[in-house]
Amino acid sequence: MAVMLRLSRMGKRHVPFYRIIAVDSRKKRDGAFLDNLGTYDGINSRLVTFHEKRFDEWAAQGAQMSDSVRRLYTMHKASTAKKPVENKKKKEASASDKSKKSDAKEA
């Protein structure tokens, strides 16, 4: 059985809302599925829920991703990537330097 990770439409007319599902590739788009992996809001272009562990399990078992699901997965990875943390000491030091400079200008 070839498993696909793809979108299944859930919303009403002109209000697209999708489930990210694992499904047998021979099934219909909105037919029976094996696992629900998350939801995607098509109007606001954002992931509402995403079950990353289950998604990774299916991908490790050899499930193929559709182009849309691959794009959503990379979007999710980019949004959850750790951002560099600024050093608080540098911020405090630069703030105190600015206050010293302003005091010197006033005097």
Image: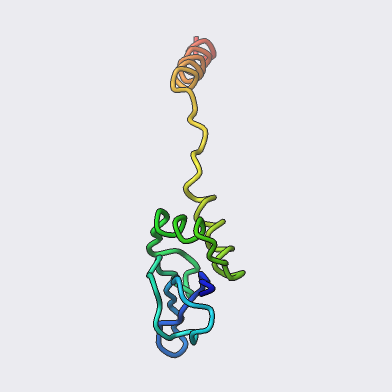
- Residue depicted at 42% across the width and 55% down the height: 52
In front here: 65 or 26? 26
Figure coloring: rainbow
Kindly give the residue lying farthest to the bottom in the view shown. 13
- Residue depicted at 45% across the width and 82% down the height: 9
Location of residue 70 (image quadrant): bottom right
Q: Position of residue 87 (x, y in %)?
A: 48, 23
Kindly give the residue lying farthest to the right in the view shown. 67
Numbered disc total: 0
Q: Position of residue 97 (x, y in %)?
A: 51, 14
Q: Position of residue 99 (x, y in %)?
A: 47, 17
In front here: 45 or 26? 26
Q: Position of residue 80 (x, y in %)?
A: 47, 47
In front here: 47 or 38? 38
